[in-house]
Each structure stands twice: as C-alpha cells, then as structure tokens.
Image: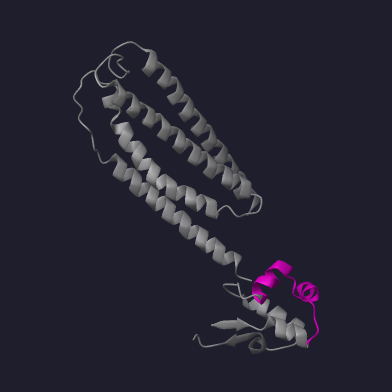
Amino acid sequence: MIVINLDVMMAKRKMSLNELSERVGITIANLSILKTGKAKAVRLTTLDAICRALDCQPGDILEYRKDD
Amino acid sequence: MEKASSRTLKIVCVLALIGIVLWVAFYAVQSYFVLTTGSGHGVINWGSPRMGLKLTIFTLNRVTILLMAGLMAAFIFNILKHLRGGAIFNRANVVLLWVMTIVLPIHSFISDNMGIACSTSEHFDVALTDSPFVYAMVALIVALLYKLAYDAAREQELTI
C-alpha cells in the first residue's frame, strides 16, 4: 500500500495546512483527503506543486509499505 | 460542468418532469372512465364474477404507475438538486435506479394482465409476454451504466 507522509513533511517544514493550501493552490478539503490517505490518485501537477512548496522529493511524501 | 451542458440537462429534466405529470394525468383520467363507464370492453364490468381480484389487479396497476412516476420524479429532482455542484451522478440515484429495475418489470407484467380486470368472465388467462423481461434488461443496463458513471465520477472526485 502507498502511505502519504504529507503530515511528516509539513511538520519538518513547520508549515500549516492553511499555508500549504495557499502555496499549492488546492483546497484544504482536498489536502485533508490527501493527508488522511483517502485519495484514489494524485496528479503529477499536484505532486510537483507540493514538492516545490515543501522543498522535498516525491519519495519524501509517498512511501510504499507491504500489506500484512 | 459547462454552462451550455448544464442548461441542456436542465431543459431535458424539465421536459421529463412534464412527461411524468402528463403520464400520471392520463392514467388518472383513464381510471375515471374505466371505473365509471358501464359494462363493455376495456372497462371494469361491475357485478361480473370475481370482482375482488379484478379490482386488485386494477389497483396494483395504478399503484405501480404512481410508484414508477414517483421514482422517476425523485431521480430527476436529485439531478436538478446537484446540478449546481456538478455532482449529477449521486448515490441516491444509483439506489433509485436499482429499485426501478425491480418495479418496472412488475408494472409491465401487471399492465399486460389488465385484460383480466376488464373481462366479464370468471375464467382468467394470465399473460406472460416478453415485455417485463425487455423492460428489466433495459432498466438493468441503464442502472449499470449509471453506476459505472457514478464510480468514475467518485474516483475523479478523489483524484487530488
């Protein structure tokens, strides 16, 4: 399964959901869907904007974990 | 949703609602004549044998017409309600279409046997034509297509 570590990166960068939402240009509601792992897919453009805002790599946000 | 598409959909919905109202009105007027006209073909022959069964079939026919009209009207109102938000494929309508898949063939079967309600004899021949099966298949295809569209819309909604 794919785990979204958005909250970890946000904590590292000391960035609030509100600020990230403004920088990335997507709604807080959609960021929450992403953060809680409810999203079915992530657009490359969204990933690009998040990586730019948090100054990180896609691998810092997305992580693959084997299902038990 | 584009403004033109939204407007077209709104017009189609209003036309469909008018159609439903006319459908129900037609059967309301027809019911009056079927029940009040004297003995003859195509009307309730009061005093003929097994009136209870005949009136039950007639009543069931009108109930299924009202039920179908209600289901279709609810389906259209659901689309109109969600039109502004763009979510015209919604869960409530998926359920309504599954219910219609069951009600429509039943209505068709009862309609096919309305001749019993209007007969003068005691002997009944139950008619089973292909209509209920055709209606069931068409309703099933529409319900499945709508469900597929709903799932696709939901997936799109959860793509960030």
Note whether residue A27 is visible: no
Q: Vertically, is B104 above or below B37?
A: below
- The quarter holding residue B64 reads top left
Q: Where B99 falls versus A47 (above or below)?
A: above
Identify which residue is drawn at 33% across, 29% down: B57
Res B52 quadrant in image: top left
Is B128 rendered above or below residue A38? above
> The magenta stretch spans which residues?
A13-35
Q: Where does the image place residue B128, in percent across and percent down from the top left?
A: 24, 38
> Going 64% across and 71% down the picture, which residue do you hit?
B160
In this view of the protein, which residue sits in the foreground, A21 or B114? B114
In magenta segment, residue A30: yes
Residue B28 is at least partly visible in this image = yes
Horizontal side of A39 relative to B119 (left or right) equals: right
How many numbered callouts? Answer: 0
**Observer-nearest of B71 and B141:** B71
The prevailing secondary structure element of the residues shown in magenta is helix
Residue lying at the far top in this picture: please name it. B38
User: What is the quadrant of residue B114 in the picture?
Assistant: top left
Q: Quick check: B48 left or right of B93?
A: left
Residue B70 in the figure: left or right of residue A29: left
Q: Nearer the viewer, residue A29 or A26?
A: A29
User: Residue at the spot x=53%, y=39% of the render?
Assistant: B73
Q: How is the rendered protein coloured?
A: one colour
Q: Quadrant of the N terminus of chain B?
A: bottom right
Query: Where is residue B14 shown, x and y percent of the image?
Result: 57, 37
Q: Residue A38, relative to residue B24: is it above or below?
A: below
Residue A66 placement (x, y as % from top left): 51, 88
Which residue is rendered at x = 52% and y = 50% of the image? B93
**Magenta stretch containing residue B10, yes or no?**
no
Residue B80 x/y as whole percent: 60, 45
